[in-house]
Image (cartoon, rainbow, N blue to C red):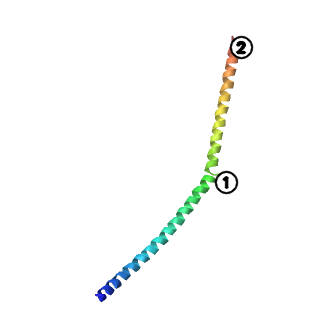
Amino acid sequence: MIQAADHQQTDIYPAVVRIQEQLSHDRAAMNQTLIEIRRRLEAIEHGLNGNARPGIKVRLDRLEQDHHRRDRFMWLIAGIAITAFLTRLIELI
């Protein structure tokens, strides 16, 4: 019986070693994947916040400000045109 137990242990040992090697390989692969994910996240963060240059957030804010200024300017032009038209109409009457 002791010989049977010893035989089972010797049969199991190579399988355990293979499993440990596979786990080690998988862990290394996961570490590489994690490094790549961190690198990509850093690139995304630099794109959003900028890195010595304006990022997407700042550029978008500038575009929105330009849009609001353009809207106010167009309303000003429309008001001037309507006022000029009404002034000329009143002068004709």
Above/below status of 84 relative to 63: above
Residue at 29% across / 86% down in the picture? 4
- The residue singled out by tag 1 in the image is 53
Residue at 67% across / 32% down in the picture? 73
Q: Secondary structure at mark 2?
A: helix
Outermost residue toward the left? 1
Q: Residue 12 appears in which quarter of the rendering?
A: bottom left
Q: Position of residue 86 (x, y in %)?
A: 67, 18
| Left or right: 13, with 34 as reference point | left
Q: Residue 68 appears in which quarter of the rendering?
A: top right
**N-terminal-most mark, 2 or 1:** 1
Residue at 65% across / 29% down in the picture? 75
Looking at the image, is mark 2 or mark 1 nearer the viewer? 1
Above/below status of 71 relative to 4: above
Q: Position of residue 84 (x, y in %)?
A: 69, 21
Residue at 52% across / 65% down in the picture? 34
Outermost residue toward the bottom? 3
- The residue singled out by tag 2 in the image is 91
Along the line of sight, the residue nearer the viewer: 41 or 75: 41
Q: Secondary structure at mark 1?
A: loop
Q: Position of residue 79 (x, y in %)?
A: 67, 25
